[in-house]
Amino acid sequence: MIDERHWHDECGVVGIAGVEGAAELASLALHALQHRGQESAGITVADGHRLLTHKKMGLVADVFDEATTRTLTGHSAIGHVRYSTSGSSHILNAQPLQVASHRGTMSLAHNGNIVNAPELRREMELEGSIFATTSDSEVILHLLARSRAETLEQALLDVLPRVRGAFSLVVLTRDQLVAVRDPYGFRPLCLGRYEDRYVVASESCAFDILGATYQRDIDPGEMVILGDGELTSRFL
């Protein structure tokens, strides 16, 4: 009898910054990460002015055909394939999760499992927060929206110490892409180079299909801000 736990790697994420046609590259990377989740697939793109998200239940090949990726215009993208470890297998829980807040629109893709998500969620619901999904990933978005920090990276540094468990995150705004790995390194996250730009992914096989070069693993507790050919690193 096959133990299904060995068939699932609990989601895959990818992030590509500053590359025209980023959605097409992200969809290719998700094909390479398909073994990490077969329930749903999604991509958010940014063009400097807005975010656009497309996601559906099913395999990458069923969700992203050539016509679909052509409509997702932008120079930065994050993508996600899902195997549900928290929250039901439903389109509402498919990622990336895109929301609007006082920070502007942001989108998040998460690989991991937040063990204190129920108590954080209860605390915020008692204070008036309304959740749209049953995914633990949405808790992080609510924490970010509630933070008074001026920048996204400052908000992440502010709220992620409250989060217990495993996480590799990619967060996209209209002009910024940030990737973070939890302090214990429970979930993988790799850094690569595509031409003169940076990419991140759950596994380096995603770089191979893009023709990108593996640089290194993102360190446990490290947060990287991917700019146009530049990289800034900070630690939680």
Image (spheres, helix red, strand yellow):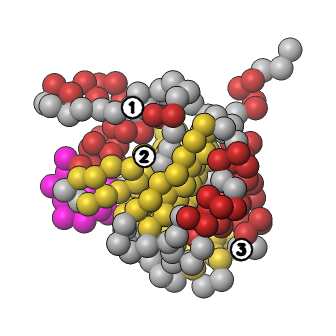
User: Quadrant of residue 79 in the image?
Assistant: bottom right
Can residue 174 be found in the magenta stretch?
A: no
Residue bearing mark 1: 133
Instruction: Residue type at mark 1: give it.
Output: Thr
Q: Residue furthest right?
A: 1
Point out which mark residue 213 bears. Answer: 3
Q: Residue furthest top?
A: 1
Of helix, strand and loop, which one carries label 3?
strand
Q: Nearer the viewer, residue 97 or 120?
A: 97
Image location (x, y in percent) of residue 114: 43, 34
Of helix, strand and loop, which one carries label 2?
strand
Q: Residue furthest front?
A: 67
Do labels 2 and 1 touch, CB within 8 Å? Answer: yes
Instruction: Please say if 182 is above or below 232.
Output: above
Instruction: Residue type at mark 3: give it.
Output: Thr
Point out which mark residue 97 bears. Answer: 2
Can residue 151 be found in the magenta stretch?
A: yes
N-terminal of the pair, mark 1 or mark 3, is 1
Q: Which residues are magenta?
A: 146-158
Q: What predominant SS class does the magenta segment belong to?
A: helix
Q: Judge whether residue 204 can be spotted in this image.
A: no
State the CA–CA distance, disc 3 to disc 2: 28 Å
